[in-house]
Image: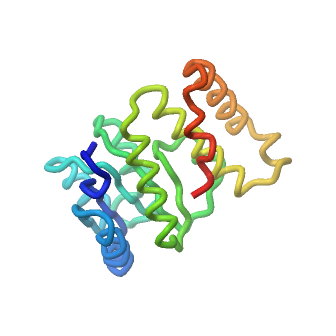
């Protein structure tokens, strides 16, 4: 992790050049080291030579989906926070996806900055705290999208809630700083 958040390395990955340029310009207002990739394979090639702190990753790309890229990032053990940035409405399938935050396009400037700051702060933690942060983020995204009836009847969601409770107990009250995860 960088000494200060402005020194963070950020990678923006999207197959639409205009989106990549827009996000890069916006993030460049606050962060000194912003890179871009216009596809999943290009993003993975970047990871072989650099170590970004945060990756903004489009979910639907023609050469390799964001889901596949996120899987490869975790399988290869890269130490980076993944923000899925997508026009795809979240469904219960996100429970098993290896990302740290999920933003729906269009993404406003303050929402983008808030998400990056959260991930930079979360990236400073390891193990159970980082997992707790990711689990709480997924819960917040799903709860925003689904009705209470849908939530109640979904096994994946209930398992995710159970995992959050397990992590809370294991962390013994050190999770208070993550309680307002959906307030950006």
Would residue 78 be found to the left or right of residue 150 on screen? left
The one nearer the camera, 172 or 79, is: 172
Can you say whether 125 is above or below 111 in the image? above
The one nearer the camera, 12 or 172, is: 172
Where, quadrant-wise, is the C terminus in this rendering? Answer: bottom right
* Residue at x-position 57% and y-position 46%: 137
* Residue at x-position 71% and y-position 50%: 143
Q: Position of residue 18 (x, y in %)?
A: 35, 81
Instruction: Give the quadrant of residue 116.
Output: bottom left
Can you say whether 59 is above or below 25 in the image? above
Q: Position of residue 179 (x, y in %)?
A: 62, 41
Instruction: Give the quadrant of residue 87.
Output: bottom right
The one nearer the camera, 91 or 8, is: 8
The one nearer the camera, 91 or 9, is: 9
Can you say whether 52 is above or below 123 in the image? below
Q: Position of residue 135 (x, y in %)?
A: 57, 38
Q: Residue furthest toward the left?
A: 49
Would residue 40 be found to the left or right of residue 60 on screen? left
* Residue at x-position 25% and y-position 52%: 44
Where, quadrant-wise, is the N terminus in this rendering? Answer: top left
Q: Position of residue 159 (x, y in %)?
A: 68, 31
* Residue at x-position 30% and y-position 39%: 79
């Amino acid at each position: 992790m960088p000494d200060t958040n402005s020194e963070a390395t950020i990678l923006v990955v999207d197959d639409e050049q205009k989106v990549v340029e827009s996000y890069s310009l916006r993030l460049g207002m606050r962060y000194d080291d912003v890179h871009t990739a216009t596809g999943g394979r290009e993003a993975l090639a970047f990871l072989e030579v650099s170590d970004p702190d945060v990756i903004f990753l489009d979910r639907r790309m023609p050469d390799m989906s964001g889901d596949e890229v996120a899987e490869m990032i975790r399988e290869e053990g890269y130490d980076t926070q993944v923000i899925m940035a997508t026009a795809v409405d979240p469904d219960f399938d996100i429970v098993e996806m290896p990302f740290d935050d999920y933003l729906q396009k269009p993404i406003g400037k303050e929402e983008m900055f808030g998400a990056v700051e959260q991930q930079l702060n979360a990236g400073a933690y390891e193990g159970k705290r980082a997992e707790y942060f990711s689990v709480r983020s997924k819960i917040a995204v799903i709860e925003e999208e689904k009705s209470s009836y849908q939530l109640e009847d979904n096994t994946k969601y209930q398992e995710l809630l159970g995992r959050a409770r397990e992590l809370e107990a294991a962390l013994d009250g050190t999770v208070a700083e993550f309680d307002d995860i959906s307030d950006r």
